[in-house]
């Protein structure tokens, strides 16, 4: 930890371990806030987002008053995200999923339609407000689906081609999208369930499945608790460490042999986790304890999502003028309508489809971590959706970027 005067204000820099400790305290405080205000819990707003946003607000106050700024080492965030996706891969390998490949392609096509729709809407509204047409793309998939990374990389190129302030517009739009995706995915899922009652139908179905074999399931659950020993915990820790090590080594190797291919470390961890899971499942020499994997999964998610929320620089929203803010609000409304009238019925109008809709709102407005947090807020209360946990980050994150990045570059050259 280091505190110093930078010439304008006090700057406090936190090292990785202190940042980790603060993020865990903020996560627990976010849980408490959800308990104090039940409407937040019922709306499926992630506790990590609530806690992390409190840190971001304190930082915003210090920045605006020119009194202090807070920064921290995010070195733990990326490994935690990889660990979370490794747990998803393991769970998926041991689950029984039907039509997984079909639904993966279907969801990917929906993401492509969403990307095209965002850009068409943004361009049309930019023309309506007599703004440069590419600003509509900056307030579309360039910053919403692409996030801060694509917005920051495409901004300077747009400025060279005559779009004044493109970088600031892209960053501000990405920040607005992150906040919108984090705080609207859960309430939208609640509204969707109010209209369709799929959660109640799932609960009734689960009860029917449990009743005929109630005693054996109780014994199985008891055995699972007995196997939660120090030895079992350490074996699962070693397994996850191995998966993270292999995925970390795989990404640079693939990048070296395929320079044009960009594979996020989280996607690599999920794929390696799934492959390792299939291998140990076939061997029969390792019995996966889902309780331990779920424990790690919740821990990793809490760490990386709280840190991601803590990193929000809310002062970037000051670049949003009224026309740009209107475009972004229309993008949020478009996302809701798309998920309600297209995504939910196309993906099956069931519990998995509802979870995917909350995830889609998270990643098409913000980022994949938002999507996973939105879905976890639902599945932690009503049961897992392994299909959604695999399809959303794979099709919406990695495969979606394969379409979005070239499309944004094409529109940059066509509209400027």
Image: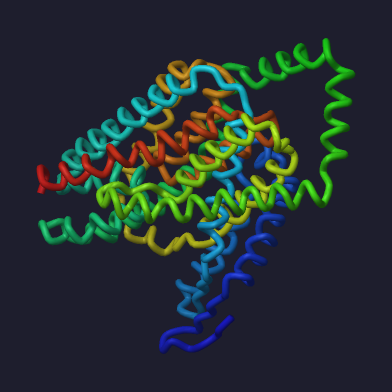
Q: Position of residue 243 (x, y in %)?
A: 56, 48
Which image quadrant: the N terminus? bottom right
Image quarter for residue 326? top left
Image quarter for residue 148? bottom left
The vertical placement of 272 against 242, above or below, is above
Image quarter for residue 206? top right
Q: Position of residue 411 (x, y in %)?
A: 16, 42
Q: Position of residue 305 (x, y in %)?
A: 56, 52
Identify the residue shown where x is 67% and y is 60%. 24
Of residues 18 and 276, which is closer to you in this image?
276
Q: Is residue 86 left or right of residue 146?
A: right
Identify the residue shown where x is 47% and y is 19%. 347
* Number of numbered discs on residues: 0
Whether residue 70 can be seen here = yes
Q: Is residue 28 left or right of residue 241?
A: right
Q: Position of residue 289 (x, y in %)?
A: 74, 38
Identify the residue shown where x is 51% and y is 57%. 78
Whether residue 290 can be seen here = no
Q: Is residue 125 left or right of residue 245?
A: left
The vertical placement of 200 against 398, above or below, is above
Q: Which colour assignment does the render follow?
A: rainbow
Of residues 410 and 64, which is closer to you in this image?
410
């Amino acid at each position: 930890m280091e505190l110093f005067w930078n010439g304008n204000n006090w700057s406090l820099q936190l090292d990785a371990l202190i940042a980790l400790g603060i993020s865990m305290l903020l996560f627990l405080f976010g849980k408490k806030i959800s308990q104090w205000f039940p409407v937040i819990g019922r709306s499926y707003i992630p506790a990590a987002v609530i806690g992390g946003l409190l840190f971001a607000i304190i930082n915003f106050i210090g920045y605006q008053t020119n009194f202090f700024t807070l920064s921290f080492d995010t070195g733990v965030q990326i490994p935690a995200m990889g660990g979370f996706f490794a747990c998803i891969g393991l769970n998926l390998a041991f689950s029984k999923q039907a039509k997984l490949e079909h639904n993966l392609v279907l969801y990917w096509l929906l993401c492509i339609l969403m990307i095209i729709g965002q850009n068409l809407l943004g361009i049309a509204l930019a023309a309506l407000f007599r703004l440069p047409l590419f600003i509509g793309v900056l307030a579309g998939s360039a910053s919403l689906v692409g996030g801060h990374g694509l917005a920051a990389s495409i901004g300077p190129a747009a400025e060279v081609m005559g779009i004044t302030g493109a970088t600031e517009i892209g960053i501000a739009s990405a920040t607005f999208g992150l906040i919108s995706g984090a705080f609207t995915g859960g309430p939208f899922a609640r509204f969707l369930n109010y209209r369709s009652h799929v959660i109640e139908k799932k609960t009734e179905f689960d009860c029917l499945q449990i009743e005929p074999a109630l005693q054996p399931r109780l014994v199985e659950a008891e055995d699972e608790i007995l196997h939660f020993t120090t030895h079992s915990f350490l074996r699962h820790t070693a397994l996850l460490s191995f998966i993270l090590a292999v995925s970390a080594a795989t990404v640079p190797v693939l990048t070296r042999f395929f320079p044009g291919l960009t594979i996020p470390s989280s996607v690599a961890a999920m794929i390696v986790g799934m492959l390792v899971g299939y291998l140990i499942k076939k061997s029969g020499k390792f019995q996966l304890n889902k309780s331990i994997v779920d424990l790690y999964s919740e821990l990793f998610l809490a760490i990386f999502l709280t840190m991601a929320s803590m990193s929000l620089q809310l002062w970037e929203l000051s670049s949003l003028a009224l026309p740009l803010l209107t475009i972004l609000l229309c993008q949020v409304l478009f996302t809701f309508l798309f998920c309600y009238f297209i995504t939910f019925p196309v993906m099956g109008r069931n519990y998995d489809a509802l979870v995917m809709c909350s995830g889609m709102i998270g990643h098409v407005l913000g980022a994949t971590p938002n999507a996973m947090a939105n879905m976890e807020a639902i599945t932690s209360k009503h049961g897992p959706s392994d299909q959604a946990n695999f399809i959303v980050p794979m099709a919406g994150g990695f495969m979606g970027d394969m379409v979005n990045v070239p499309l944004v570059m094409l529109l940059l050259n066509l509209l400027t």
